[in-house]
Amino acid sequence: MAVRQVSKFDLPDLGVGVGFRVPHYRHVVETRPEMDWFEVLSENFMVEGGSPLYHLDHLSAHYPVVPHGVSLSLGGDGEPEHLRRLIALCRRVNAPWVSDHLCFVGAGGVQTHDLLPLPRTRAVRDHVVRRIRDVTDAIGIPFAVENPSTYVAHVDDEMPEWAFLAEIAEAADCAILLDVNNIVVSGVNHGFEPMDYLAGIPAERVVQIHLAGHTTLPSGFRIDTHDHPVPDPVWALYAAAIRRIGPVSTLVEWDDNIPTWERLAEEAATARRIRAESLS
Ligand SMILES: [Fe+2]
């Protein structure tokens, strides 16, 4: 019998959705294919007008839409203009929640456009908690923090990533977007057990799960490329996550070598089947 946790956030289970990506914009807004919900990359729609907002407005008129960002830089300082644009986007699509990564993207005025791993120290934890509280207060909807894929660790790390994430979520009273592909990728790269990670996460705070594929280098090192189908170890961890967390909104990310809409919808259908089986 599956253990079902009740989310502490009063948020809907949206089912299984996919990322809204350029090759599918026209097909989706013109034919409205069957899909439970869509995630949009926030930064692509934090603009004043034009084609992105035309497609976004058509999308959000017919599907639930959740913005997901890559440049909030929770480890860095907040940018008021970035936050203002993010708030406008959330209101435009009536977002139930909004998410970004547990990382920093630059320092000293340099923006790397990469999701860089934070030193897992108590001081950084407290800084990120303050940032998330400020963002949540400003946006006025639940904020979900996502575990990134990482390739290096800091010598001054004081705790494993799952403890860092859990302590931040508890202290900031925020939600978690659990990326099970990122857990598999980082698990191989750093030598931890994905099931230990899953067991260390406060299940009642998980409001969304990410699924994706990744690349395995000849050395065995994993890179989070989002350019492959979801591999078996990620499906297996997803099933375990659903058993532990319950029926939580799930999103398939596929951002490079983007397949046809039909192939992407197939991947979502597989997630839907595994999710249902894991709950029975
Ligand atoms: Fe993700």
Image: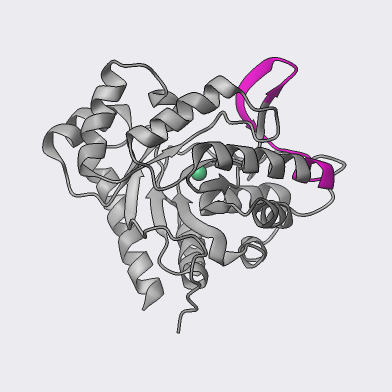
The question of residue 269 being in magenta is answered with no
Residue 154, image x, y percentages = 81, 39
Question: The N terminus appears in which quarter of the rendering?
Answer: bottom left
Residue 65, image x, y percentages = 33, 42
Which residue shows up at 28% across the image and 30% down it? 56
Residue 142, image x, y percentages = 50, 48
Total marks placed: 0
Residue 145, image x, y percentages = 58, 46
Where 275 falls versus 101 (above or below)?
below
Which residue shows up at 20% across the image and 42% down it? 62
Instruction: Depth check: give the residue in front, 10 or 105.
Output: 10
Which picture quadrant has residue 109?
A: top right
Where 233 falls versus 262 (above or below)?
below
Residue projecting furthest to the bottom: 1
Residue 220 in view of the camera? yes
Residue 102 in view of the camera? no
Question: The C terminus appears in which quarter of the rendering?
Answer: bottom left
Residue projecting furthest to the left: 31
- Magenta residues (range): 106-125
Q: Is residue 62 left or right of residue 174?
A: left
Which picture quadrant has residue 72?
A: top right
The question of residue 123 being in magenta is answered with yes
Which residue shows up at 70% across the image and 41% down it? 130
